[in-house]
Image: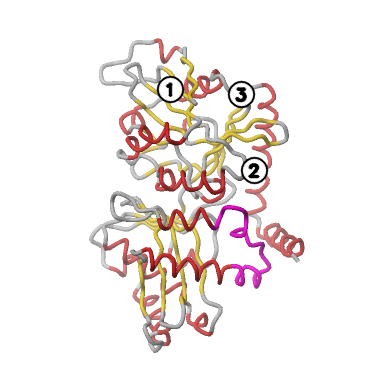
Amino acid sequence: MTMAALIESPTAKSQPRSGERRIAHLEILQDLREAEPIWRNLEVSQFSTPYQQFDFLSAWQRHVGTDKQLPPSIIVAFDAQRQPLLLLPLVLGTESGVRVARFMGGKHTTFNMALWQQDFAASATRADLDALVRGIGELPIRIDVLAFTRQPRHWRDLQNPMALLPSQPSANGCPLMIFSPGAPPSARISNSFRRRLKGKERKLETLPGYRYCMASTDTEIKRICDAFFAIKPLRMAAQKLPNVFAETGVESFLRAACLTPLTDGGRAIEVHGLECDAEVIAIFAGVADGHRFSMMFNTYTMSESARYSPGLILMRDIIDHYAGRGYTSLDLGIGSDDYKRLFCKSDEPIFDSYLPLTTRGRMAAIGMSSLARAKRFVKQTPALKRSAEMLRGIMHR
């Protein structure tokens, strides 16, 4: 099903300067198959994060979004020649009686972005973004609020045009590691830290069949995924945390994405493991796009081998693997866990925008914004953060 609306704005009406492309109209597509050709063409420019790959988000929509009754509402902006300038991969849901459009992927995406035609992204102005928001409000489907959360301010060397709109810092940060091309391994991980990890690894190397594996075959992927879904519930229970991977559709989505091949030979989610013949010792999985590896989920064994920091050893192997392939950065997902700071010395700035499109949406946007600011304050105040974690543990028990 396709709905379309013409954007009539000063930006659309004015004569663009030579070489410039402006938004002329929008369409909203409610069928992934209809959106797929445009989506895949925009992926070629790679001005979006690896979380916006069609194969990744279509797997999420099939297994999670559909179950949560969040229908696709994919907005495409075109220029006057009917060439796509950007695609917003959104779903539309009702929250307390308010119609809210959010990015596909829910809490499984560290970063949310539109897929941008690169030249347009580099030249987009605040007037273009205002025209986009105004045009969405004029589409023949009611949306009260655009809740655009966890957006990176920059991606690679280009500003995210959405940063031109009103925004606020996200509640959580994202630890980031930058790779310098041609730099020695010690520039990524110090020699002293490497020696400590190697000392621990010697204990694991005595295990028959000990090895690092980037899973490349379906058999390898299934074996490591089986281990993850067996170990993770035990580890979360030990930490008195709810098992978010038990939510309807989540396991099916992750398994499907791990197995989905991409045209470059990778998978929609790439899986890494430390193994021996007896067990999978540690697991990390994430998305990659040739420039950035972004970690999604991880766990490590409940056996005696956990004493030797297998997660840190695997993280070292992953960092060296992607640096060796010419990647320029790696992130470890939302949150500032202590182990992340052992590797990541900076942060990816991310922001939220709550953009009302109706009178009803105006009050809802204020409420969403205020709640997000309160969460950020708690996260950044150690005493409040400890109290919140203690309360969460009590509620879980």
Residue 221 location, quadrant: bottom left
Colour theme: secondary structure
Q: Can you give x and y, in whole percent of width and height, for residue 191 in the image?
A: 34, 75
Q: Secondary structure under badge 1?
A: helix
Mark whose residue sits in front, 1 or 3? 3
Q: Earlier in the sequence, mark 2 or mark 3?
A: 3
Residue of label 1:
128
Q: Secondary structure under badge 2?
A: helix
Residue of label 3:
142
User: Local crowd at mark 3 within 10 Å, few (<14), some, or many (≥20)?
Assistant: some
- Alpha carbon separation for disc pair 2 and 1: 27 Å
Q: Is residue 309 above or below residue 62?
A: below
- Alpha carbon separation for disc pair 1 and 3: 21 Å
Name the residue rendered at 31%, 70% in the picture.
Answer: 186
What span is colored magenta in the figure?
Answer: 233-251
Name the residue rendered at 51%, 53% in the picture.
Answer: 253
Name the residue rendered at 37%, 76% in the picture.
Answer: 194
Q: Can you give x and y, in whole percent of width and height, for residue 251 in the image?
A: 54, 58
Q: Is residue 17 covered in magenta? A: no
Q: Earlier in the sequence, mark 2 or mark 1?
A: 1
Residue of label 2:
373
Q: Can you give x and y, in whole percent of width and height, for residue 45 in the image?
A: 30, 38
Q: Earlier in the sequence, mark 1 or mark 3?
A: 1
